Image (tube, rainbow, N blue to C red):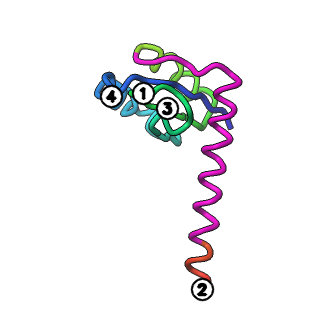
């Protein structure tokens, strides 16, 4: 599965929300997180788009108008942290329903 990570200033949130409504992009998995949570500058959002390669490519083209692609080392670090966050949440819910 393809993915991309963007950093978008909070001031461009309305524009970002409009871009995420695109038919192809909206069908992909996307997460928004406060950039400061991951050691990035405050006042920004991190946007993860994950899904079909052609839709991720489209998202990269469109999101460049409101933000910047994270450099590869930073993107990989944040991506791993987001995946760990998801796995921890899933494990916690599993414990909740099995007890």
**Residue 99 badge:** 2
Marked residue nearer the N-terminal end (4 or 3): 4
Q: Is residue 41 above or below residue 36?
A: above
Marked residue nearer the N-terminal end (2 or 4): 4
Q: Residue at x 49, y 24 (%)?
A: 7
Mark 3 element type: strand
Marked residue nearer the N-terminal end (2 or 3): 3
Q: Is residue 63 above or below residue 95?
A: above
Q: Mark 2, mark 1: which one is toward the viewer?
A: 1
Q: Residue at x 61, y 73 (%)?
A: 94
Cβ–Cβ under 8 Å for marks 3 and 1: yes
Mark 4 element type: helix
Q: Mark 4, mark 1: which one is toward the viewer?
A: 1
Question: Between marks 4 and 3, how big is the CA–CA gap?
Answer: 11 Å
Question: Between marks 2 and 1, how big is the CA–CA gap?
Answer: 39 Å
Tell whether 62 sits left or right of 69.
Answer: left
Question: Residue under circle 3?
Answer: 46
Q: Residue at x 54, y 35 (%)?
A: 48
Q: Residue 5: percent from the left, percent from the top?
A: 57, 28
**In front: 87, or 15?**
87
Question: Residue under circle 4?
Answer: 13
Span shown in magenta: 66-93
Question: Between marks 3 and 1, how big is the CA–CA gap?
Answer: 7 Å
Q: Residue 29: percent from the left, percent from the top?
A: 53, 42
**Residue 44 badge:** 1
- Crowding at dot 3, Cα within 10 Å, few <14 / some 14-19 / many 20+, comes out as many
């Amino acid at each position: 599965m393809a993915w991309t990570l963007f950093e978008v200033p909070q001031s461009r949130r309305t524009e970002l929300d409009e871009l995420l409504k695109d038919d192809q992009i909206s069908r992909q998995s996307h997460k928004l997180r406060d950039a400061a949570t991951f050691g990035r500058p405050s006042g920004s959002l991190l946007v993860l788009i994950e899904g079909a390669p052609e839709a991720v490519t489209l998202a990269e083209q469109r999101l460049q108008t409101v933000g910047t692609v994270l450099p590869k080392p930073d993107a990989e670090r944040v991506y791993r942290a987001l995946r760990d966050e998801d796995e921890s949440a899933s494990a916690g819910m599993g414990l909740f329903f099995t007890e």
